[in-house]
Image (cartoon, rainbow, N blue to C red):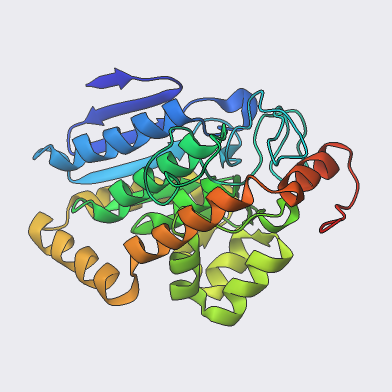
Amino acid sequence: MSTDGPEVRVETDGAVGRVTLAAPDRLNALDPAMLEVLARGVRDLDADPVVRVIVLAGEGRAFSAGADLGDVGVSGTGDQSGGEANGIGDQSGDGANGIGNQSGDGANGIGNQSREHPLDGTLVGVGEAVRAIVGAGTPVLALVPGVAAGAGLSIALAADYCLVADDATLVLAFGALGLMPDGGATAVVAASIGRARALRLALTGEKLTGAQAAEWGLLAESVAAERFPGRAAELTDLLAALAPQGAARTTAAVNDATLDLEAALAREESGQAELIRTDDFAEGAAAFREKRRPVFGR
């Protein structure tokens, strides 16, 4: 079975459900429509009694480069313009920014903002996608052979098992834009690698290879690029063969013991809703496009 959405494919093949981000021309940069289909697809697959594992993947060389800025315009009010990459540094003109938020407005801490912002919906949408992933009783496997940045990284790390290639590029990529991590990253990253390293990644925007991320404990496993497809298939089969109720109880227990996801999302969504409206955000976006260092607080 296959359900095609706006640049997201939701498919089933026996016990395997797949949600594939399918906008490789812009490194699977996330827009509100994609995030809506992603969240709904995960929930639908989780509700399907035949599906025993949900695989998240991206077409092309990236899992996801972050949020798609589209045609949002840079201005002194903190509104931004799109068409750029996400602060990974090796991409340009791909429409992503690594902020990890989406369109739609009045929920999750942003409804009290007096001015609508084009990224309000992104902020809500990435939160809903992460809620769906963390809340799934069916094991969720994220496959990251290349780039995962901003919201893309938040979504990958929300999975129960994240497999990356040794040479993958992982970056939170929020600070250079004058933003904070979102999509549950403040909780998930800190729970995985501790407060000090979580702040190191969030404040500096340091890039990690997949091998470094696995060594730090940020994610489950890293393998050489040539072994990635085979290992992905092995893990898919392994997770699909688990006892469904046992797997669901296990993931729920570990998540409940280590994450306060709703509190984290509420803090992130409220804080980010303010930050996207600041002059610092406008400066960060402009500096990225102009390939210069931002000068904040002017």
Judge whether residue 109 can be spotted in this image.
yes
Q: Nearer the viewer, residue 2 or 41?
A: 41
- Seen at 58% across and 27% down, the residue is 24
- Seen at 20% across and 35% down, the residue is 44
* Numbered label tally: 0
Q: Nearer the viewer, residue 21 or 120?
A: 120
Write down the quadrant of residue 179 in the picture: bottom right
In this picture, residue 126 sits left or right of residue 240: right
Judge whether residue 88 can be spotted in this image.
no
Residue closest to the far front: 114
In this picture, residue 201 sits left or right of residue 132: right
In this picture, residue 191 sits left or right of residue 67: left
Write down the quadrant of residue 26 in the picture: top right
Q: Nearer the viewer, residue 206 or 290?
A: 290
Q: Quadrant of the N terminus?
A: top left
- Seen at 23% across and 64% down, the residue is 251
Q: Quadrant of the C terminus?
A: bottom right
- Image coordinates for residue 139, horizontal then vertical, percent: 25, 53
Q: Is residue 262 above or below residue 38?
A: below
- Image coordinates for residue 232, horizontal then vertical, percent: 41, 48
Q: Nearer the viewer, residue 286 or 163?
A: 286
- Image coordinates for residue 92, horizontal then vertical, percent: 77, 33
- Image coordinates for residue 8, horizontal then vertical, percent: 41, 26
- Seen at 89% across and 38% down, the residue is 290
Write down the quadrant of residue 197 in the picture: bottom right
